[in-house]
Image (cartoon, rainbow, N blue to C red):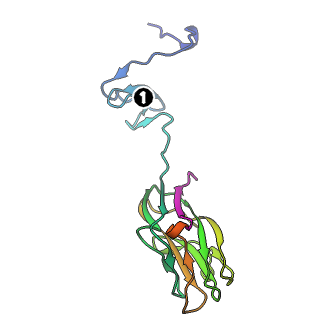
Amino acid sequence: MAGTLFENNLSPYLTVVEQGSTPANPSAGNQKLFVRTSDHVLCYVNSSGTVTPVGSATVLAYGSVMDSSGDHTISGTAFADVDTTHCGFSITTGARKLMVGWSGSVFPDGTRRVYLDIAIDGTRVANTTEGAFVSSTTANFFAGTITLISGSALSAGSHTVRLQSRQSAAGGGGTIAGGSAGSPVGFLWAMEMSS
């Protein structure tokens, strides 16, 4: 019996009947196309029995936190987490790079510079000495934005993203705005990259 050729049956659509179970493996070098009943997804099965969704899109992870908890005073000269609750979060990713960012405001104390960076799993992403953002010493308002990409792909799983800060000398203390008395809020985010 001769098979029906698709090209002999021109139609603006193709009707595929849902398959209750995966069809039998095709012979070597061939694949079978079917619609799974369990999730209504178009799939193909190869000669080894491996089922693969057709055109399945990977959903990339995104996480963020908006800090309106109050301003944060910077006192140390070594980079440290600003606030793990209001300036940090966890994100579950595949084995991909992360693009991370922060936007907010910094108020130096008039004598010391403020340095900011973003850490992924405790490792800072930018320069080891200055971080990703450096203010002047002027007691003034600085709006800042940081956007960084992790140097290599992370392992698949849960990762922490934290805003870190330090100042140029001990004593005094600059401030990172966090919504106190009308000051701006900070926004920390991370987005998984597709490549």
Image mark count: 1
On the image, which quarter does residue 28 sit in?
top left
14 within the magenta span: no
186 within the magenta span: yes
Rendered residue at 48%/33% (across/down):
54
Which residue type carries mark 1?
Answer: Ser
Residue 94, placed above or below residue 31: below
Q: Which residue is mark 1?
A: 27
Magenta stretch, residue numbers: 183-195
Residue 75, placed above or below residue 195: below
Q: Residue furthest front?
A: 181
Rendered residue at 69%/81% (across/down):
136
Secondary structure state at the residue bearing disc 1 = loop
Q: Is residue 137 left or right of residue 90?
A: right
Q: Position of residue 166 (x, y in %)?
A: 55, 82
Residue 7, placed above or below residue 168: above
Q: Which quarter of the rendered picture does the N terminus lie within?
A: top left
Q: Is residue 75 left or right of residue 37?
A: right
Q: Position of residue 127 (x, y in %)?
A: 62, 77
- Judging depth in this view, the residue of 166 and 175 nearest the camera is 175
Q: Position of residue 129 (x, y in %)?
A: 61, 83
- Judging depth in this view, the residue of 41 and 89 nearest the camera is 89
Q: Position of residue 43 (x, y in %)?
A: 43, 31
Rendered residue at 50%/70% (across/down):
180
